[in-house]
Image (cartoon, rainbow, N blue to C red):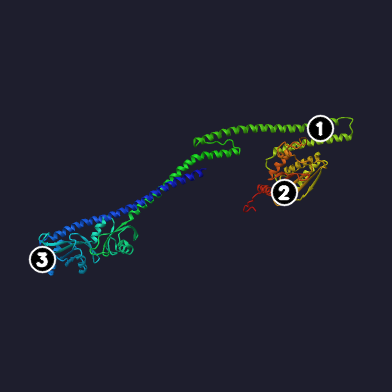
């Protein structure tokens, strides 16, 4: 019952706890991924805000340069070499990464840049293409470098009706410094790519190479929330096209911003959640098990005590005390069982007392009846023998009847004496069963009930086994005597057959008579004390003694169904039980001798 109660409650509580924790874990994982996606979008917007501020500064810077009189004067020379030589000073003054001057037709005159000089043809192609959008900064990809460039026209006189002298272009490079600034602001790894090539990034060279090989469309097309693994770290990545190249109809040469948000912090959070989930599940399991075990014991321990009391009561122990622990219903059940136990003990005592008195009464009635019968016969015959006018033959006949009465009294007293000794220890000895049987047959033949009865012996052998010869002989004697008495009540000549049957496991003494048989009502209680098929012919103790003696030898007595005209009683003696009796005697009488040095 405890198992039946404990397991479902444990499974239910632990299952609900584990399911709740798993739901929390799933929600945390989903929320973490959602937060990463939001952070990713926020990172892109952060760069766009930085880019917008930078463009505003760049537009103002280019406008200030375009208003410098000295620069206008330089451009009025319309000499390329003069402009190229003088433009260096203005580039240095601007402090920009890129500086270029164009003539009034928008053709490139000269360009300056930090680092390795750029290809003049590509610079001319890209810069000349944007001169129709003066003042509007634009991203340009030049020789695997990305520049944010703003162009302003130079006018001699007012802008509205002045003379166009040319154009000035100013820009800054998107390099490692800019990438670090964006990375710090966005709290993520960033990379700038052009045509699938990573131009600049905050990644290590090894991770950058993996990004190029695994990035795919991430480096070329706008992509949202793509998972990518670089090294041992998982990233959630997004890419955004920054601008379109002026004069380009395709996506060729278009810079891409790639932002990579690491799952490492989220993974640590999920791992912490997993550890907490596991710890809480184990705590829930331990605490739940303890609580459920305590509850189950509160419910089942009183029931176990009650079951123990029931078993003790079934075994005849009426002194088993029950505790009154547990729930109110169980305590009430225990109190009811206690009342029943007390009542049964009282009833048992009363029943034993009445049974004891009834047994004593039946025994006294049986003994007094038989003794009175024998004594009356002895008294009457003795009175006849005292007469002076009886002959010698009559005197001998009366003397024989007196002897018969004495023999009956002797048998009665022997039966009572042996009945009081049943259950005591046997006194086994190695004895021939055939001799035991023959002694019993001789005693029966000398008994008045055995006269005029043909007793036949079959299967006698010289087998010797460990038995209590006196008790077993008495059992055989009682069965033979009953068989002779029954045979005399039959219709034909009285006959009794005793057969000794030996097998590998059992020794059987089979006694059959040709009497009228045992009535069906008597068969069910034939082996009980003071039960006799014919009360005038016995005390009712013979079969009871025989059964108890057979049981003391480890066997029993069977009353077979009537076969033909025979009633058969069989004494069964298992060989294993008889060997055990002998082994016990040999063990008891064996002596261990110890040799003492020097004394032989």
Asked if one can make out residue 282 in the rendered structure from this viewpoint, the answer is no
Work out whether 517 lies above or below 135: above
Q: Which residue in the protein does label 1 denote?
A: 377
Q: Which residue in the protein does label 2 denote?
A: 507
Q: Secondary structure at mark 2?
A: strand
Q: Secondary structure at mark 1?
A: helix
Nearer-N-terminus badge (1/2): 1
The answer to whether residue 275 is left or right of residue 472 is left
What separation in Å lies between label 3 and label 2 (alpha carbons)? Answer: 147 Å
Q: Secondary structure at mark 3?
A: loop
Nearer-N-terminus badge (3/2): 3
Local crowd size for mark 2, using a 10 Å CA cut-off: few (<14), some (14–19), many (≥20): some
Q: Return the x and y of residue 351 as percentages of the image width and height.
A: 64, 33
Dots 3, 1 in contact, CB < 8 A: no
Local crowd size for mark 3, using a 10 Å CA cut-off: few (<14), some (14–19), many (≥20): some
What separation in Å lies between label 3 and label 1 (alpha carbons)? Answer: 178 Å
Q: How many numbered marks does the figure carry?
A: 3
Work out whether 564 lies above or below 341: below
The answer to whether residue 307 is left or right of residue 65 is right
Foreground label between 1 and 2? 2
The answer to whether residue 505 is left or right of residue 121 is right
The circle on residue 237 is none
Q: Which residue in the protein does label 3 denote?
A: 76
Q: Return the x and y of residue 220 as percentages of the image width and height.
A: 30, 62
Q: Nearer the viewer, residue 177 or 276?
A: 177
Q: Nearer the viewer, residue 130 or 593?
A: 130
Foreground label between 3 and 2? 3
The answer to whether residue 586 is left or right of residue 254 is right
Residue at the front extreme of this rendering: 161
Asked if one can make out residue 594 in the rendered structure from this viewpoint, the answer is yes
Q: Nearer the viewer, residue 199 or 249?
A: 249
């Amino acid at each position: 019952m405890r198992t039946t109660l404990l397991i479902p409650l444990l499974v239910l509580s632990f299952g609900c706890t584990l399911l709740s924790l798993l739901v929390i874990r799933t929600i945390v994982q989903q929320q973490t991924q959602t937060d990463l996606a939001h952070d990713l979008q926020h990172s892109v917007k952060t760069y766009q805000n930085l880019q917008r501020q930078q463009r505003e500064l760049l537009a103002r810077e280019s406008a200030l340069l375009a208003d410098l009189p000295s620069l206008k004067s330089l451009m009025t020379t319309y000499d390329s070499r003069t402009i190229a030589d003088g433009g260096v000073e203005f580039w240095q003054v601007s402090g920009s990464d890129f500086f270029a001057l164009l003539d009034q037709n928008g053709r490139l005159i000269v360009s300056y840049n930090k680092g390795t000089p750029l290809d003049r043809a590509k610079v001319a192609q890209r810069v000349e293409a944007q001169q129709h959008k003066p003042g509007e900064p634009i991203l340009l990809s030049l020789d695997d470098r990305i520049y944010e460039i703003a162009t302003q026209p130079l006018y001699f006189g007012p802008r509205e009706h002045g003379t166009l002298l040319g154009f000035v272009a100013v820009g800054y490079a998107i390099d490692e410094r800019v990438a670090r600034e964006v990375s710090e602001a966005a709290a993520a790894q960033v990379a700038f790519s052009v045509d699938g090539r990573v131009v600049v990034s905050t990644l290590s060279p090894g991770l950058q190479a993996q990004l190029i090989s695994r990035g795919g469309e991430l480096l070329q097309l706008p992509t949202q929330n793509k998972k990518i693994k670089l090294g041992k770290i998982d990233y959630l990545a997004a890419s955004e096209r920054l601008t379109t190249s002026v004069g380009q109809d395709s996506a060729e040469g278009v810079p891409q911003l790639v932002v990579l948000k690491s799952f490492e912090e989220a993974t640590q959070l999920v791992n912490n959640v997993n550890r907490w989930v596991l710890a809480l599940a184990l705590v829930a399991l331990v605490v739940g098990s303890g609580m459920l075990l305590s509850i189950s014991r509160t419910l089942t321990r009183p029931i176990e005590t009650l079951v123990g009391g029931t078993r003790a009561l079934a075994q005849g122990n009426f002194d088993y005390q029950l505790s009154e622990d547990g729930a109110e219903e169980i305590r009430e059940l225990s109190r009811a069982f206690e009342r029943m136990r007390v009542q049964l003990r009282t009833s048992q005592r009363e029943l034993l007392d009445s049974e004891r008195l009834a047994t004593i009464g039946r025994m006294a009635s049986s003994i007094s009846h038989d003794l009175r019968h024998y004594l009356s016969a002895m008294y009457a015959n003795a009175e006849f023998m005292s007469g002076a006018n009886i002959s010698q033959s009559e005197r001998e006949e009366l003397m024989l009847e007196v002897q018969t009465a004495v023999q009956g009294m002797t048998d009665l007293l022997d039966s009572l004496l042996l009945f009081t000794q049943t259950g005591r220890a046997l006194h086994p000895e190695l004895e021939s069963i055939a001799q035991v049987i023959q002694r019993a047959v001789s005693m029966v033949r000398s008994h008045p009930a055995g006269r005029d009865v043909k007793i036949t012996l079959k299967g006698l052998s010289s087998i010797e086994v460990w038995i209590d010869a006196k008790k077993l002989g008495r059992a055989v004697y009682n069965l033979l005597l009953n068989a002779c008495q029954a045979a005399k009540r039959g219709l034909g000549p009285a006959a009794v057959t005793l057969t000794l049957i030996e097998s590998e496991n059992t020794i059987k003494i089979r006694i059959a008579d040709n009497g009228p048989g045992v009535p069906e009502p008597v068969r069910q209680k034939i082996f009980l004390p003071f039960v006799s098929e014919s009360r005038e012919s016995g005390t009712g103790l013979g079969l009871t003694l025989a059964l108890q003696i057979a049981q003391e030898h480890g066997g029993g007595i069977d009353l077979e169904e009537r076969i033909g005209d025979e009633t058969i009683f069989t004494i069964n003696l298992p060989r294993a039980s008889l060997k055990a009796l002998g082994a016990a005697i040999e063990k008891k009488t064996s002596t261990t001798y110890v040799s003492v040095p020097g004394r032989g």
